[in-house]
Image (tube, rainbow, N blue to C red):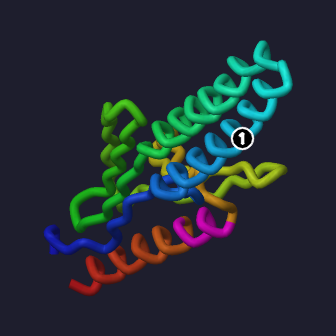
Amino acid sequence: MSDAVYFDATLRPSRSLDRRGFVLLLSLLTALNLVVALRLAASGGWPILPFLGLDIAGLAFAFALNYRSGRLAEHIRLSGDALTVTHVDPGGAAKDWAFEPAWVRVALHERPHGAGRVTITTNGKGVAVAEFLTQGERQDIAAALNKALSERARRLTAA
């Protein structure tokens, strides 16, 4: 029964604009800036030209940071032996937690303005997960994890 897997999920932040969309957006903005730059240069407004490149560079930098933060991941796995949580930060560093499933409590904590988290605790120690998900997604994860814990307990007591 210890090799059975009751829950296995990898959580990642949502990104609404993929790489292809980003390249398209940046290309369109660059083309628009080029048209404005040519028009300004023709009418004597050449001192403004460097600033037209700064907005594109700033936008590219902001998206680069956004995509870097999108590499964040959390892996939650419940087997017969343990509940493990692996948190991988945007830089790639991983941190692991392991819990005895029989004593685990899963709770949903919501705060104003859509902020919240799911906590996995045992004996006063624990970890917060799913902070980057929407409220509905956090509710689904908490419910699915609680259901999996109940299923594990039911199967182990029936055996």
Q: Position of residue 133 (x, y in %)?
A: 60, 57
Above or below for 115 versus 154: above
- Residue sitting at 42 percent across and 35 percent down? 90
Q: Secondary structure at mark 1?
A: helix
Tell which of 84 and 14 is nearer to you.
14
Tell which of 108 and 38 is nearer to you.
38
Quarter of the figure with the C terminus: bottom left
Asked if residue 21 lies in the magenta stretch, the reply is no
- Residue sitting at 83 percent across and 20 percent down? 45
What is the three-letter code of the residue carrying label 1? Val
Query: What segment is highlighted magenta in the picture?
Result: 136-141
Q: Is residue 83 left or right of residue 58?
A: left
- Residue sitting at 22 percent across and 61 percent down? 81
Q: Position of residue 120 (x, y in %)?
A: 49, 51
Tell which of 54 and 98 is nearer to you.
54
Above or below for 75 versus 149: above
In which quarter of the view is residue 59 placed?
top right
Residue 105 in view here: no
- For this orientation, the residue located farthest to the front is 42
Instruction: Label the magenta part by its dominant secondary structure.
Output: helix
In which quarter of the view is residue 3 placed?
bottom left
Q: Position of residue 57 (x, y in %)?
A: 60, 27
Residue beneath disc 1: 35
- For this orientation, the residue located farthest to the top is 47
Above or below for 11 versus 140: above
Q: Position of residue 83 (x, y in %)?
A: 33, 57
Residue 65 in view here: yes
